[in-house]
Image: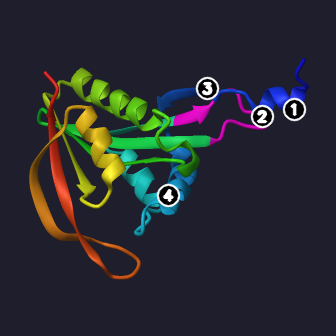
Amino acid sequence: MKTMLESYLTLKREFEIVAMGSDDCVAVSILHGERFPRPWGDGEFHSLLSQDTVFGFVARQTNAILKKPLAGFVLAREAAGEGEILTIAVQPKLARSGLGWRLMQAAMREVRNRGGESMFLEVDGANVPAIGLYRKLGFEKVGERRAYYVDESGAKSTALVMKRVLR
């Protein structure tokens, strides 16, 4: 028979994905800062969310003992029949857990619900795991922006522009 501690340590994490609100902006900006070299502040997230065309989703662990920590988020927009992923991030310890897939599905579903027929995103050409996820979701490369991203060391990398038809 397992002790309570053993049960917790072997517990499979469960997550809920809910609409992002302005009260999520601080936590979202912290995670964004952990995952990207040019972090967005909570004011930037709040400003974007206040626009009618912009929406987001957050993922929280529902079976955590202490609180529901932010596990990941996606921020997107839909306008004139096109959706765009503005940014997405998942806690590093949850990489390759399917959480990014679920967040992307939520964003694509919302774009479809708003009348969007296609979805675009930009991704660093060196981000092989993200490119793999996007390809599995049906995104295809439609363009490049050379020397678009700059990392902490000043090295530049290409942004891949990817698209998926939703209808």
Q: Are marks 4 and 2 in contact (CB under 8 Å)?
A: no
Q: Which residue is mark 4?
A: 42
Percent x, y of residue 80? 11, 36
Q: Position of residue 130 (x, y in %)?
A: 33, 47
Please state the horizontal and vertical placement of residue 14, each as a whole percent of the image.
Answer: 61, 26
Q: Which mark is residue 5?
A: 1
* Circles 4, 3 touching at the beta carbon (< 8 Å): no
Q: Quadrant of residue 160?
A: bottom left
Residue type, mark 1 in image: Leu
Q: CA distance from mark 1 to mark 4?
A: 36 Å
**Secondary element at tag 1:** helix
The quarter of the picture where residue 81 lies is: top left
Tell me which colouring the rendered structure shows.
rainbow
The Cα–Cα distance between marks 4 and 2, rounded to whole angstroms, is: 32 Å
- Tag 3 residue: 14
Going from the N terminus, do you reach mark 1 or mark 4 first?
Answer: 1
The magenta region covers: 59-69
Front disc: 3 or 2: 2
**How far apart are the alpha carbons under marks 2 and 1?**
6 Å
Which residue is found at the position 24% from the left and 59% from the top?
A: 125
Task: Kindly report the secondary structure that dominates the magenta region of the rendered protein.
Answer: loop
- Quarter of the image with the C terminus is top left
